[in-house]
Amino acid sequence: MVNEEVDIIFHCVECVHIPQDMEVEAPEVLEAPPSPAPPSPPPSPAPPSPPASPQPLDDTLPDHSFDITLEVAEENPVVESDIEDPELSDSFVEDIPVTFEVVENGTMKRAKKLVSSDGFSYTVKSSTSKTVNWRCSVRNKKVWCKATVMQRGHNFVRGSTDHIHASDPGITKRTKIRVGVLTEASRHAYKSAGDIVDEQMREHVTEEDFNLPKPDNLTRAANRLRQKMRPAEPKEIDFEIDREYLACDNFLVGDLTVDTARHVMFSSPTQQQILQKARRWYLGGTFKVVRKPFTQLFTVHAFLQKEDSIKQVPLVFVLMSRKRKRDYKAVFERLKQIVPDLRVEAFCLDFESAAWSAIKIVFPTAEIKGCSFHWCQAVMRKVAKLGLKTAYDSKKSVHLFIRKLLALPYLPSDHIRPAFTEMLQTTATASPQIKQLMTYLQRTWFNNTVWTVQQWSVHRLSVRTNNDVEGWHRRFNGKAAHNHLHFYKIVPAFQQEAKTVSITQQLVSEQQLSRYQRDTYKQLQGRLTSLWDQYEEDSIRTSDFLRSVGHLYAPPVPQPETLPESDSEDSDYESD
C-alpha cells in the first residue's frame, strides 16, 4: 500500500454553512502487491470540506427549543413524624372530691381568681366579712355561664346552677404561670419578658400537664403590664422625675442642669461609703444602653479589696445629655458635695479631653492616668485611616516598627520621648504614611496640652487599663438585651446593680470573691515584669525592650468600616 498525505480542513458547524450537494473528489490510492498477512487498512479519512465564504462570528449562545420526555421520578423527602399522642392508660383513676384554690392577682385585672380542680374558674361577684360569692368567669357574648360557688372561710359550696360549657383542665396551671410571669415582670423591669416566661414555664410545667398557655401571649401580657405601670417615658430634657414610682429618694443624688444640658446621678448609701474611701477611681462612658433625651451613661468604679480578695464595682451612675468640660465639672463637683472628705488620689480613664480638663479643675492634686488599651486603640485607628493595614499585615519592617511604637507607654516616662526621637530619625526615607503616623503621635501624644507623656506612661503599673469598666458596661448592656433603655427602665436596673454591690462587698470582706484573671494575662504580666527588671538593670537595650513588649501586646488593625467618625486628634468634644 502506498501512503499519501491528505489535508483535512475543519470548519465550525455553527459558523460555516456547507452545501449538501457539493461533490468531493477522493484522493487516488495505489494498490500494493498482496502480502501473506496483510494488516487491516486504516479507516478512510473524512473528505475535506471546501472553504466557504467567511461569515462574521457570533458570541451569543443559540436559544433553541427542546423537550425531555423522560418520566418524572417521585421525590420522597425525609420529614419528621408528628409527636405521638400519649398512650391511653389502662390504670383506673378513682374520682376525687373537687378542690378549690384562690389565686391572688389571677384575673386579667390582677384581682382574685378561684380555680377548681375539675377545670373551672370563678371571679368575685360580691363579698361580706364572712362570705364570698363567686361566679363563673366565662361570661361573654356567646356564653354567659351562671354557675356559682359560695365561700365561707375555707369551705366552698357549689350553687344549684351547672356550668353550660366544657371544663378547662389546664386552668389552674395556666393561672399560676400567668401570675408568676406578671409578678416577675413587675419586679425586674429590665429583664427580658421572654426569659421570664421561659423560667416560669420550666418551674411549673410537668410532663403530665396539658392545655398549656401560649408563651407569646404571656410575653405580651408582661410587656403590657410594664407599660401600664411605668410613667410616660420622657421625650424632652425638662421632664419631671416620678420619684414615687422609682422609690429613689436615697438613690437619686443629683439632678443637674448645665445651661441646656441635664445630668441625673444615682448612687446608694453603700456605694457612697465605698466611694468615699476609694483612692483610685476608674471612669468610663457608654452610649449603647441609653435613649434620648440622654446620650451617655457615665459611671465611676473602684476596687473593693481585703488581702488577696479584690473586685471592682460600680459606685455612681450618671445619665448625661451632653459631655463637655463644664458638664463633667458639674458632675464631679456634685460628687464632692454628696460625699464629703473624698480620699481619691488617682483617676484612670480613656482619652476624652473634656473629662480630663474637668478632673484637673475639681481635683487639681490628683494623678490622672490614661488607659493603655485606649491609647493603643487610638494609634491603631490612625494606622487604619492612613491606609497602613495591608503594610502592617504583610511587611515585616512596618509591622515591627508599629509594634515598637505601641510599646512606648511601657517605658519609664522620661525614656519615652528620647526613644520616640530615635525611632523618628529612622523614618527619613520611609513612606509618606509612616511619616504622617509619626506626625500624629507628635501632635496628639507628645505636644498635647491636655495630657502629658507621663500621664499615658504605664511603667510598672499592675492595672494599666479601665477594661473592668468596659467589661461592666458590656454586661449591663447584655442584661438590657442590647436595647436603648427608657429612663424608667434603666433606673430600676441601676437599683438592682446597687444591691449587687452590697452583696459583693460582703463577699470580698469574707474573702470569698476575687478579680478574675485569665492564665494568659498572668503569664503576660510575668513576662512584662521580667522585661522591666532587665531594662532597669541595663541588661537589655531600649530597642530590644520595645521589640519584646511589642511582641506581647498586638492589637489588631480595625477594619475601615468600623472606624469612628472622629479620632483623638480631631475630637468633637468641646473644651468648655
Image (spheres, grey):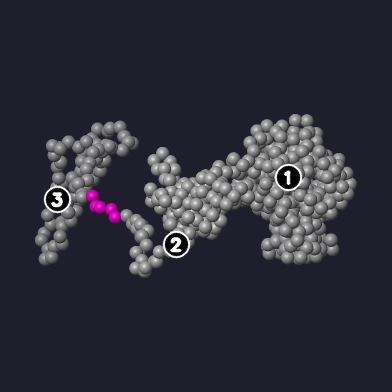
Residue 248's mark? 1
**Three-letter code for the amino acid on which mark 2 is drawn:** Pro
Image quarter hosting the N terminus: bottom left
Identify the residue position indicated by label 2 in the image. 97
Query: In percent of the image, x 80 and y 57: which residue is there?
Result: 461
Mark 2 vs mark 3: which is more N-terminal? 3
Residue at mark 2 to residue at mark 3: CA–CA distance: 116 Å
Task: Report the predominant secondary structure element of the magenta stretch.
Answer: loop
**Tags 1 and 3 touching, CB below 8 Å:** no
Residue 349's mark? none
Identify the residue position indicated by label 3 in the image. 29
Residue 390 at least partly seen = no
Residue sitting nearer the eye, 440 or 149: 149
Extreme residue toward the top, this view: 260
Residue sitting nearer the eye, 375 or 132: 132
Q: Residues within 10 Å of mark 1 (few under 14, many from 20)?
A: some
Mark 2 vs mark 1: which is more N-terminal? 2
Query: What residue span does the magenta drawing correspond to?
Result: 72-76
Residue at mark 2 to residue at mark 1: CA–CA distance: 50 Å
**Three-letter code for the amino acid on which mark 1 is drawn:** Cys
Query: In the structure shown, which secondary structural element does the residue marked by tag 1 occupy?
Result: loop
**Three-letter code for the amino acid on which mark 3 is drawn:** Val
Query: In percent of the image, x 48 and y 61: which residue is there?
Result: 206
Mark 1 vs mark 3: which is more N-terminal? 3
Query: In the structure shown, which secondary structural element does the residue marked by tag 3 occupy?
Result: loop
